[in-house]
């Protein structure tokens, strides 16, 4: 029996506002087609605007400069996004 495929991914919080220099830990939940949480799945974190918000491989975001950035979590090819607004 193979592993249950990931059908959806959720990132929390989905939206946040931070001051420059602040950090926030984001979390991800992978779900199967019935909406049940799947544990133990690897997550890849990226920032679409790393000059505004940097994100670690563990999902910790750091506000670098004012602006808006999207954080993306990818689990087995399925993505979810969070928006971070950085204030000066």
Image (tube, rainbow, N blue to C red):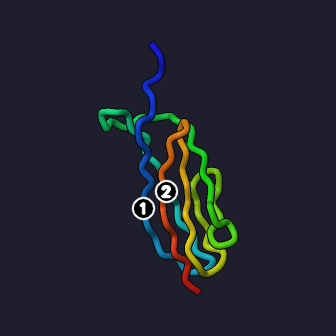
Q: Which mark is residue 73?
A: none
| Label 1, residues with CA under 10 Å away: few <14, some 14-19, many ≥20 | some
What secondary structure is found at the residue carrying circle 2? strand
Q: Which residue is mark 2?
A: 81
Farthest residue to the left: give it: 34
Q: Are marks 1 and 2 in contact (CB under 8 Å)?
A: yes
Residue at 49% from the left image edge and 56% from the top image edge: 81
Residue 30 vs 72, above or below: the answer is above
Distance between mark 1 and mark 2 Cα atoms: 7 Å
Q: Which residue is mark 1?
A: 14
Farthest residue to the bottom: give it: 88
Farthest residue to the top: give it: 1
Residue 40 spot, x, y in % from top left: 50, 34
| Label 2, residues with CA under 10 Å away: few <14, some 14-19, many ≥20 | many
Residue 13 spot, x, y in % from top left: 42, 61
Label count reads 2
Residue 47 vs 3, above or below: the answer is below
Residue 8 vs 88, above or below: the answer is above
The image quadrant that residue 5 belongs to is top left
The image quadrant that residue 60 belongs to is bottom right
Q: Quadrant of the C terminus?
A: bottom right
Q: Quadrant of the N terminus?
A: top left
The image quadrant that residue 65 belongs to is bottom right
Residue at 67% from the left image edge and 66% from the top image edge: 50
């Amino acid at each position: 029996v193979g592993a249950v495929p990931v059908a959806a991914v959720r990132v929390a919080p989905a939206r946040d506002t931070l001051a420059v220099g602040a950090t926030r830990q984001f979390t991800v939940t992978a779900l199967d087609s019935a909406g049940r949480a799947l544990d133990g799945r690897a997550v890849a974190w990226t920032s679409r605007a790393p000059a505004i918000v940097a994100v670690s491989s563990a999902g910790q975001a750091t506000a670098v400069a004012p602006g808006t950035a999207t954080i993306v979590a990818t689990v087995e090819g399925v993505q979810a996004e969070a928006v971070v607004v950085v204030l000066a």
